[in-house]
Image (cartoon, rainbow, N blue to C red):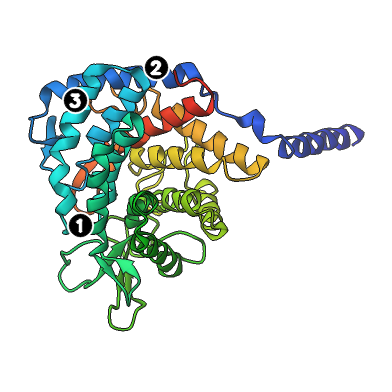
Amino acid sequence: MKKSISILMTLAILIVASCNQPKEEKQATFDVDQAKAALDFSIKQYKGMREIVPDSLIPKSVKDGQLVARGIRDWVSGFYPASLWYLYEYSGDEELKAEAEKRTWLLEPLKDYTGTHDLGFMIYCPFGNAYRITGDEKYVPVIIKGSESLITRFNETAGVIKSWDWTRGDDWTFPVIIDNMMNLEMLLWAYEKSGNEAFKAVSLSHADTTMKHHYRDDYSTWHVIDYDTENGGAKGKMTHQGYSDDSAWARGQVWGLYGYTVMYRQTKDKKYLEQAKKVADFVLNHPNLPEDKIPYWDFNAPDIPNAYRDASSGAIAASALLELSGYVDESLSSFYLDNAHQMLKSLSSPAYLAKLNENGNFILMHGVGHLPGGSEIDAPLSYGDYYFIEALVRYLKMNNAFK
Ligand code: GLY
């Protein structure tokens, strides 16, 4: 009897002790050498990519073993040149700079394009990076004009920028997707550069209205909100790329996480920081977030744990969390960093990182573009690569190991 009491007490002490483990003990061991190795690999892979992409096109994914490349109006057109700029910034390699220049200027006509909300991705990622890295003013007018084109899509009554001009049957008339939060960085940058108050007003209105209508009580987000442009407010809440209207499509969650982190950086308004923290809490404490921290394509996919992972969501989240870790108290900061490091460690491992000259020369495997639409399922995605490279660059800069 005495023996079993003492065994029970020992067990109880062990359980209490393990609950009190400081978070640091669970830290992923991602380090500067791993980050540099992943970037060095990315350079080799993208130098190979340069050889196989037609001059007038931009790489997007791989289908049936063949590279998929698209024209400049595809929403992903900014990511390849923008990735090249980061790789040039890291390496100083003039060949990468020449390729980045060439592919960036291919996109210049987009500055007058008013048919999409994705101009932040398409213009700001490449031209913004080019300007930040070279300091050359020639990139600036493209970003300002692109911002003017983007705000033509703003509706005063609804208070948001329209995402898509196409409809899905009668499903919506003024659709706004959570992804649209990613286009506000360009507007806030353009406001600071030009002083045009309209850029700021539109971005604040869009971010505030999205907070009001896009988010559920648990801080997960719907993918699409259909707005009422006569009376304002939401007419419909649904998904397009997620599992169901009520599910949490992974990339949508992390677009919001990244978007509100940027809103806080650019405005210092605490409500955006609180929003980013709440979204991070939903994502990072979700019971369906796997051990390696790379999300399933939808947090409510019915076939979890056999559901596809979306490496792009892991990359976007890692980059956002590295930034967000700089805006919060120490314990939250180390929680965000632990998660971001685990994401980077997973993505840099053979489970997600391609082999040299395979995977259509993309860097990451296992992304999901549009599962319900039957496209880009378990495939490389140019935006997954872009945010992975960005996160690696951020990681090295934060650890004073960039050059
Ligand atoms: N913005 C489209 C996507 O995330 O797939």
Which residue in the structure is indicated by mark 1? Answer: 116
Looking at the rendered image, the quarter that the N terminus falls into is top right
Looking at the rendered structure, the secondary structure element under dot 3 is helix
Asked if residue 309 lies left or right of residue 276, the reply is left
Looking at the rendered structure, the secondary structure element under dot 2 is helix
Q: Is residue 126 above or below residue 99?
A: below
**Image location of residue 364, percent across then percent down:** 30, 30
Q: Which mark is residue 37?
A: 2
**Image location of residue 316, percent across then percent down:** 39, 41
Kind of residue at disc 1: Thr
Asked if residue 199 lies left or right of residue 26, the reply is left
Kind of residue at disc 3: Glu
Kind of residue at disc 2: Ala
Asked if residue 294 lies left or right of residue 42, the reply is right
> Residue at 35% of width from left, 71% of height from top?
159
Which residue in the structure is indicated by mark 3? Answer: 99
Q: Is residue 133 above or below residue 257?
A: above
Query: Which of the 4 quarters of the picture holds residue 76?
Result: top left
Looking at mark 3, is its residue's CB closer than 8 Å to ligand 1?
no
Looking at the rendered structure, the secondary structure element under dot 1 is loop
**Image location of residue 17, percent across then percent down:** 77, 35
**Image location of residue 194, percent across then percent down:** 34, 52
Q: Nearer the viewer, residue 114 or 362?
A: 114
